[in-house]
Image (spheres, coloured by chain):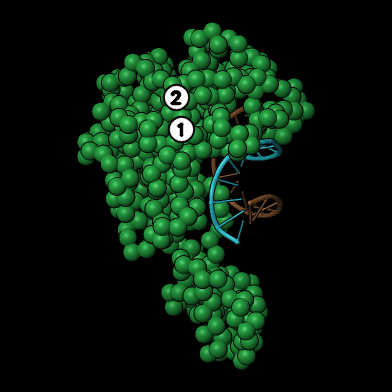
Chain colours: A green, B cyan, C brown
DNA sequence: TCCGTTACGGTTGAC
DNA sequence: TAGTCAACCGTAACG
């Protein structure tokens, strides 16, 4: 069943399948391959009453009771995916998982939720409780926490695109030079020299096979590189060593060249996607992301004009893509994005926060957040503790940007396990962030409504 | 009951 | 411009 939700200016089509107590369909589950055993009941062990399992955008409404049809968009059903054209007409829609949370298949959870997951984990809340609390699958919670523990970042990886080429013209030129200087040089020697000469580093040095291919295809007979060889030269491309891209993980979405930037309808020029690097090498380190503005802050900054300047399309979420990896040359990868974030999302200093330590860049324009999770906007997002406390809370700049349903807040608190608290405080934090500001959960202003 | 793992369908963007 | 590819995503279920 396709369920249409009108959430303010957005219309949502929400599939509702199992949260109402349906049994997962065998062979049609959202996750794994069909397995032989019988499906488990949904909400297994969730401990959530059905009403809680309903997304907030639905809960309490009689519509929620009607959302039992299976015909809605779902990853396993035809119609789960709309043609792009249709999406643009109808915008897009979320789906509802077994816990009642809204998600968009294939798209990362909003950073707010990711941040919340980490926050709650640092508060000692068990992943299973976080899962229920935020209505995110436990696998996702597990993944996000694991990633955070590993990389220090809550950010999703870069989606789409392809690995930047390492055989830039500059590299080819050097290879040619090496070969010309020593026709008997081996590919592995060239590789070593590329490293030794600083032409490449370990992250972007071509493989031996690549070098061999270059020698064979691009350089060929060095003595007479005919026009054919010349014509086979790689097209001019920015000398953007792979490592340069990923070394500075949070480049500005504004391309230095101004070309091909993710731009969205209604979004002024540069807002589209903020590039987050793929992890080759991992760029999710805390040190790389500290000081970067967050979408949360931007959300706060935009709160006043929300819904006007930014597209409501869900596609406009911050997709964390490679696409807009700009050449962050010559600019500190940490600072430049922040500076440009200022440009993009003017905001008062008061709205700055330390959540940047988790969310390096604005990947989720505010309106998108609302667009996708808004109903749930409140549903999902509970204001977290000031993080770091001294810098004010990233999620609640002036209490305006990230709203939270009061019921959720209460629920959030109920998931706190006091008995674990002491032990958890001893637990090394994945990052350097101070937790323990639990009281600030309740100290934050809670907007009455998120709609 | 919890949670790590994994298949799956989906999205994305470079090529 | 459309198709392909390979990365990522979150879900759901297994174990």
A103 horizontally vs B6: left or right: left
Q: What element carries label 2?
A: loop
| Residue A225 lies in quadrant | bottom right
Q: Check the residue under mark 1 and report the chain it is in.
A: A
| Residue A245 lies in quadrant | bottom left
Residue A10, percent from left and from top? 48, 25
Q: Check the residue under mark 2 and report the chain it is in.
A: A
According to the image, label 1 marks what residue? A312
Quadrant location, the C terminus of chain A: top left
Q: What element carries label 1?
A: loop
Quadrant location, the N terminus of chain A: top right
Q: Nearer the viewer, residue A209 or A451?
A: A451
Residue A165, percent from left and from top? 55, 64
A49 horizontally vs A424: left or right: right
Depicted A41 relative to depicted A337: above or below? above
Looking at marks 1 and 2 on the same chain, the residue that comes earlier in the sequence is marked by 2
Task: Give the Cα distance between marks 1 and 2.
Answer: 8 Å
Residue at the image point whose x is 50% and y is 20% from the top: A6
Query: Are discs 1 and 2 both within one chain?
Result: yes
Q: Given the current orientation, which residue lies at the most extreme bottom position?
A: A223
A33 horizontally vs A446: left or right: right
Residue A403, percent from left and from top? 36, 24
Q: Given the current orientation, which residue lies at the most extreme right position?
A: A36
| Residue A184 lies in quadrant | bottom right
Residue at the image point whose x is 61% and y is 78% from the top: A231
- Answer whether labels 1 and 2 touch (C-beta < 8 Å): yes
Residue at the image point whose x is 43% and y is 47% from the top: A274
Residue A382, percent from left and from top? 38, 24
Depicted A58 relative to depicted A220: above or below? above
According to the image, label 2 marks what residue? A9
């Amino acid at each position: 069943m396709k369920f249409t939700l009108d959430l303010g200016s957005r219309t949502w089509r929400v599939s509702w399948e199992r949260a109402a107590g349906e049994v997962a369909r065998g062979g049609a589950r959202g996750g794994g391959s069909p397995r032989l055993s019988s499906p488990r009941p949904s909400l297994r062990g969730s401990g959530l009453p059905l009403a809680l399992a309903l997304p907030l955008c639905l809960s309490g409404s009689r519509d929620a009771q009607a959302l039992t049809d299976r015909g809605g968009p779902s990853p396993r059903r035809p119609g789960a995916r709309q043609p792009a054209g249709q999406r643009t007409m109808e915008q897009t829609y979320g789906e509802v998982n077994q816990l009642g949370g809204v998600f968009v298949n294939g798209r990362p959870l909003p950073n707010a939720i990711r941040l919340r997951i980490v926050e709650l984990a640092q508060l000692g809340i068990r992943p299973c409780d976080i899962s229920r609390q935020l209505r995110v699958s436990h696998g996702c919670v597990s993944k996000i926490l694991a990633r955070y523990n590993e990389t220090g970042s809550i950010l999703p990886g870069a989606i789409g695109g392809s690995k930047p080429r390492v055989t830039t013209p500059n590299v080819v030129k050097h290879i040619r030079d090496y070969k010309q200087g020593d026709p008997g040089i081996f590919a592995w020697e060239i590789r070593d020299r590329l490293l030794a000469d600083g032409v490449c580093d370990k992250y972007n040095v071509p493989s031996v096979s690549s070098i061999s291919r270059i020698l064979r295809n691009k350089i060929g007979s060095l003595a007479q590189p005919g026009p054919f060889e010349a014509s086979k030269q790689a097209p001019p491309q920015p000398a953007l060593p792979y490592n340069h891209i990923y070394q500075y993980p949070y480049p500005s979405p504004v391309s230095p060249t101004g070309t091909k930037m993710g731009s969205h309808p209604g979004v002024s020029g540069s807002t589209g996607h903020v590039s987050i690097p793929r992890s080759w090498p991992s760029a999710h380190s805390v040190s790389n992301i500290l000081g970067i503005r967050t979408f949360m802050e931007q959300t706060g900054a935009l709160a006043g004009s929300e819904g006007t300047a930014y597209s409501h399309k869900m596609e406009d979420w911050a997709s964390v893509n490679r696409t807009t990896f700009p050449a962050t040359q010559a600019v500190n990868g940490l600072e430049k994005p922040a500076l440009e974030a200022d440009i993009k999302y003017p905001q008062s200093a008061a709205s700055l926060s330390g959540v940047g330590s988790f969310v390096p860049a604005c990947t989720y324009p505010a309106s998108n957040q609302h667009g996708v999770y808004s109903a749930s906007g409140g549903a999902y997002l509970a204001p977290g503790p000031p993080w770091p406390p001294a810098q004010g809370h990233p999620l609640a700049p002036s209490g305006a940007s990230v709203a939270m349903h009061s019921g959720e807040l209460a629920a959030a608190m109920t998931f706190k396990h006091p008995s674990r608290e002491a032990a958890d405080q001893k637990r090394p934090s994945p990052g350097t962030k101070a937790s323990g500001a639990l009281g600030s959960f309740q100290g934050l202003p809670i907007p009455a409504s998120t709609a």
